Amino acid sequence: MTTITTTGSDFAVLSRRIVAAGLMRRRPAYYALRLGVVAVMYLGGWAAFLAIGSSWWQMFTAVFLAVTFAQVALVAHDLAHRQVFRTKRPSELAGLIAGNLGVGMSYGWWMDKHTRHHNNPNHDDLDPDVAPEVLIWAAEAATGRRGLKGFITRHQAALFFPLLTLLAVSLKVSSVKALRDGTVRRRGTESALLVLHAVGYLTALLVVLRPLQAVAFLLLHQAVFGVYLGLTFAPNHKGMPHPTGDEDFLRKQVLTSRNVHGNWLTDVALGGLNYQIEHHLFPGMPTPNLRKAQPIVQAYCAEIGVAYEQTGLIDSYRQALRHLHEVGAPARAEHAAR
């Protein structure tokens, strides 16, 4: 196998192959269908909620709407990367409707955070997704934590899935903080849409359901939404190498990412994020083209001697949990030595 010297031109060669294959072209028919289906799910879910009324059968509605909210969030992700619309204005407008009004998350805050992640995936200092917060992704940050944070760090692998039930709440809290701190550009518009979402959501629950049912619906809906959303992102980089900063663009994106192979159902469930390597190399590529780009990218990586990680869905979670457990080892040793 011939190995090409590590230079910035490696990506240019790959990019020309992808463009020649027509994989950067827009897919308006696909997105018209996808946005239509998600809109029908969203409106249909709330219509069913109103039709069923005060009943414990609404717990099934809560689960359905949780799945729907996650699909709306995945649409917002594609809008942020301008996969849907060519220009900025319609992308932002649709993103605000999907993110702020649809699921109650600041589109501007998330887009800024996600852009920084794409620029430096898995970088200990520059990627906000691996910053030491509730969970720790680098062993260097695992020690010195006390109280509840220390307990979570020592047992974070076991607590990973339970903690995902709080992800939706965490996104809302972070959105409010960003709006309060003024780090979001369209502060007034985003705030108004978030308030409108919260008022509409809570009013629907309190008017239609009995108090105990409303609380149960809210907890179940937000928990399942958080778990589903977390499961779409967890396989992508967790447990993969952390870059030093010296890598060229292609290697920085490929070596830190993991693909999840599967069928069309996997593509739909994960919103195309199972082709994480291709998505990071070509973030503006429409989702349905990622599957077609995958063999081209994999073959090119083999050609230039760059490792290309791909695994099954269950194994991807197993690897992420193994990494969390290993990272927590220094904290467990520190605790045992006290």
Image (cartoon, rainbow, N blue to C red):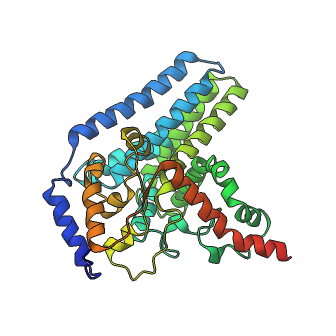
**Residue at figure coordinates x 40%, y 38% from the top left:** 265
**Residue at figure coordinates x 80%, y 66% from the top left:** 147
**Residue at figure coordinates x 37%, y 65% from the top left:** 308
Residue 26, position as x, y percentages in the image: 20, 48
Given the current orientation, which residue lies at the most extreme right position?
Answer: 338
Counting labels gives 0
Residue 93, position as x, y percentages in the image: 33, 47
Residue 96 visible from this viewpoint = no
> Foreground: 31 or 304?
304
> Foreground: 36 or 5?
5
On screen, residue 235 versus residue 285, left or right, reads right
On screen, residue 180 versus residue 22, left or right, reads right
* Vertical order, 138 against 56 (above or below): below
Image quadrant occupied by the C terminus:
bottom right
On screen, residue 244 versus residue 138, left or right, reads left
Q: Where, by quadrant of the figure, is residue 140 drawn?
A: bottom right
Residue 234, position as x, y percentages in the image: 52, 55
> Foreground: 270 or 261?
261
**Residue at figure coordinates x 38%, y 73% from the top left:** 252
* Vertical order, 86 against 123 (above or below): above
Given the current orientation, which residue lies at the most extreme front position?
Answer: 1
Residue 111 visible from this viewpoint = yes
Residue 28, position as x, y percentages in the image: 21, 41
Image quadrant occupied by the N terminus:
bottom left
Given the current orientation, which residue lies at the most extreme left position?
Answer: 20
